[in-house]
Amino acid sequence: MVGSGLFGELPEQTEPPADAAPRGAPRLREPMRDQVELRAVDIDSLIGQDHRARVIWAYVEGLELSELEDRIKARENRPGHPAPSPRLLLALWLYATSDGVGSARALDRLCDSHDVYRWLCGGVSLNYHTLSDFRVGCADLLDRLMSEHLAALSKAGLVDLEKLTQDGVRIRANAGAGSFRREATLDRQMAQAQAVVEKLKREVDADPEASNRRIRAARERAARERSERVQAAQTALAEIKRKRKQLDEKGGNGKKPKEPRASTTDPQARVMKMADAGFRPAYNVQVASAAGQLIVAAVDVDNNGSDRGLMRPMLEQTHTQLKRFPGRYLVDGGFCSAENIEWAHGKGIEVYCPPTKSRSGVDPFLPRSGDGPGVLAWPAKPAKHSTRPARSANASMPAGATGISGN
């Protein structure tokens, strides 16, 4: 069979003898991940030509950032280490925001490990301090810059700012429930912190050893910062007491008030009812957006547990940033305030929101004796049991606005 087959001319194979020497271990190429390699990398090829990072960079390249560049101290023919370009820092934060990254430390790690961020950096080394300082120190300029370009988009007809919506979302504060203290506790902690600061100051002045002075100076700084946090909590506690007094003068809310408390880590945070019906320290973040479009016009952070009365501050902020009021404004029932509606009517703004249900069972669509011209002109669909326009956000709603401000 073998002789007449395809391999008939090959010599016959014999089995190895039983007493043959054992073979050695196989030679293999195993991965060694602790070794250092020098690799040639073409940075521009890290991302595709149609990647959105290129769009953001093209946008940033066209911006006038001389005001940011004037703040840089390192100049030609003068000593000083070159600073990262403000254009680069702005592009990094714009892309990080669109990518859901809001931490300077996380952005710093991505600049070392992620190809898109490495492409944006283009070989420029950064650290989280630089990234954080840029975002905090240039916040006013960045807000103005974004507002100007939002207005430019509106003028070009790409964004409709005549129809805006507003809604609030409660964001968990970075404060534990144990950080909230009563007035007596805050006073005691303030006295202790001030005593520690004074003691450490005397030790720093009396100790001749430089190393020990530096250690004690760091301890003194930490104690001083602790004192400042406690003082901020005391200020926040005074504000809480003032608002509670105003509520009591109006008749209260029918509940027995508890002794007010303020957080020593997040003084502006308040304990709020969250979406899961639990109570935790949080902030009430207000967002105004273009109806039917994924464009945010304004953002504000408040510490009121209710949305009532927050429509006017957001409209005022929108006017400050965009130099105009919207023609129509959509909010949900939590924002319904006759005072705010009257004010908006005076500014030529049509407000669309449902009425607040009465605890006494009175029809909320019926006119009231104290209604002003703004409430009487409240644009809405007529109700079946009302002789006046009904207060409903489901009628005459701006086109494309349905569902934008739902919870």
Image (spheres, helix red, strand yellow):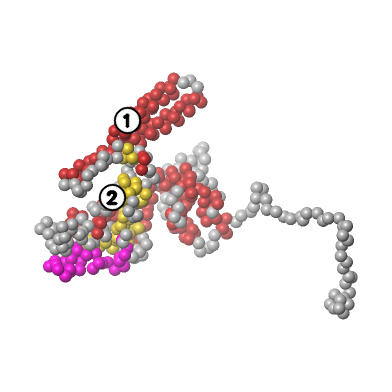
Q: Secondary structure at mark 2?
A: loop
Residue in the picture at 30% in, 66% down: 402
State the SS at label 1: helix
Secondary structure that dominates the magenta span: loop
Residue hosting label 1: 188
| Front residue of 54 and 363 | 363
Badge 1: how crowded within 10 Å, few (<14), some, or many (20+)?
few
Q: Is residue 207 left or right of residue 44?
A: left
Residue occupying image coordinates x 84% and y 77%: 6
Q: Which segment is the magenta one?
A: 378-405
Q: CA gap, disc 1 to disc 2?
A: 29 Å
Q: Is residue 394 magenta?
A: yes
Tell me the residue at 14%/63% (across/down).
366
Q: Residue 305 shows which numbered tag?
A: 2
Number of numbered labels in the structure image: 2
Q: Of label 1 and label 2, which has the lower sequence position?
A: 1
**Disc 2: CA contacts within 10 A as few (<14), some (14-19) or many (>=20):** some
Q: Amino acid at mark 2?
A: Gly
